Image (spheres, rainbow, N blue to C red):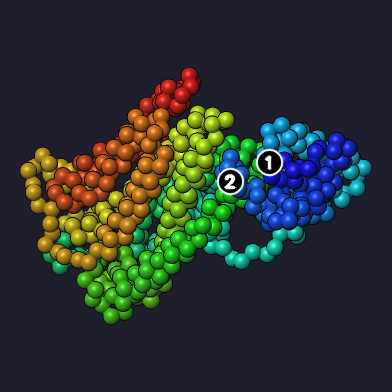
Amino acid sequence: MFRNGKLFVPPPNDGSDFKELFKRLAAAGAGRPPGEDGFPAGPWTPELLAEAISQIDSNPVGVDLRTVQLWFQENEKGVSTANIRWLARIFGCDDPIATSEWQMELSTAQSRLLAKRREWKRAGSGIALAVPDMPRTASSDDDSGYQAALARDTGANRPRQRFSLARKSEALFSHGSPLNLPASVFAGMTALGFLSYINGIHNVTYERADGLVKQVGFLWAANWTLDFMVFLPLFFFFVIELLAFWKSDGRKKLAAPGGEVDSDDAWMRNVDASSYTYWSVFLICLLFAGLFQWVGVSLIPLMKGGGNYAMDWGKIALVRPEVISVPATVVFTGLAYLYMCLVFYLFFVGLILLYTIVHDLWKIGNGLKKRPDVDHQHELSEAGLIVMRGVFRCAVLGILVAIWMKVQSSYLASNGENIVAWLVGDMSSIFQSRNDVSTGFRYRMPTHYSSLLVAISACFVFLYGSIRLGVGSRFHAPLWKMSAVVALLVVSYLLIDAFAGFSTLLAITVLLALYGLIDPGFGRWRASELGNNQSVS
């Protein structure tokens, strides 16, 4: 019989498990519209069924084709609670009563499949295969051996994928311990510090043409020590923390409750969508920020001289050959620039992932707003709150990285003997009525440009998150506070070395930003802003 213009097969209630029941329904084409001749259009294929489920209006995330293919295969894989709902809609022909009946029938059939699997395990057959489309709570007797079988089976059945830079980059942030990436960055900078000490350029001075003795040691360079040992490891830690929340809790709770595989697949599709962005950033960081900058700023001046760049640890061999030779400097600077470009690639990967999380949450929120039957306003507000806290922290750290890049570059052209004395002297100039901020020396400063790119990129992600998640949200007051801090950081960055006493504003802003890392809300956030009666800190 046909119902709502589709072939309707009533629930058989014959004790079949899910695989047996699904096989008969797919062969009959249950839920498909009739052909042009009025007869049934034929059986379901994985592609047709996946497309039909994805076209359901109340299903904002669709279903992965690989998941549907597993239902058709001769295995013991079941179906998740979320996908039972969509299959019931298909087999029930969008009839509310029939859909409810099919939902009960499919749930019962899935329970029978689970019972058979448990019997096989108790019998010690070892041939029962895992159910990847099943919620983790569906079975209480999963063990490590069973999960290993799942991994082997899944790996054997999945087609080999081409190399994906986007997926590999995302895996660096989402796989393993949250400390792996921050610790690796810190360890890399520590190794460079040891090499600089061995080569004798960790603490080295030179006499400038005007007689000023200036400290240009590697460990005195704030853009290396502070950025790569403090701010960037913290940045990676906060990105990893937010990504772990979104993938393990936030997205599953909003997008597909109980459908872990579907949620993970949908997230990876979002990652794959930015594949060209990952490649573009990788090439820019490796070729321009790394290779070309090293050749132009370090290698050519070391080999041929010139370049009109400020003297630093990377060119000290030109004026202090007794400290380090030119070949040793070439090798050390090459390693340093390679490390730098790879770390900054990871930095931009973190920003891309933050953008992806914000965009994903915004899309899911729009999809949920079209479902009047379910109220997810509180969950959306809570997820938006957590995401914006993470984005704010990462934006602050990104701008701090840019600030110390520009501070170091400005110091090299200043009259300060070392960077600490220069900042302290500039701060005290407010009380001494000194207006001189220029040294009379003019150098090329490529770090000014690269630091501006870092600051703009960090601000863009925060601005995007504020617009997508802040408009119409229930946490305007905390968002305004965070926006004010970000704006103040940008102003402080732009005014570095612009007037005497700029370091006073810089110090106040940095202290405020560091406090914001600890408490992004700048005080306890009232629960009324989230719509419940519990306080959120």
Q: What is the residue that sits farthest to the top in this orientation? A: 533
Residue 198 seen in the current view? no
Q: Nearer the viewer, residue 88 or 415?
A: 88
Residue at figure coordinates x 43%, y 51% from the top left: 351
Measured along the vertical axis of the image, is residue 530 above or below residue 171?
Answer: above
Query: Which residue is the site of mark 2?
Result: 61
Query: Which residue is the site of mark 1?
Result: 4
**Element type at marker 1?**
loop
Position of residue 84 measured from the top left corner of the image (x, y, whole percent) = 71, 40
Position of residue 507 measured from the top left corner of the image (x, y, whole percent) = 25, 41
The amino acid marked with disc number 2 is Val
Position of residue 482 measured from the top left corner of the image (x, y, whole percent) = 34, 36
Q: Nearer the viewer, residue 510 or 424?
A: 510
Q: Quadrant of the C terminus?
A: top left
Quick check: 532 left or right of 152?
left
Callout 2 environment at 10 Å: few (<14), some (14 to 19), or many (20+)? many
Q: Earlier in the sequence, mark 2 or mark 1?
A: 1
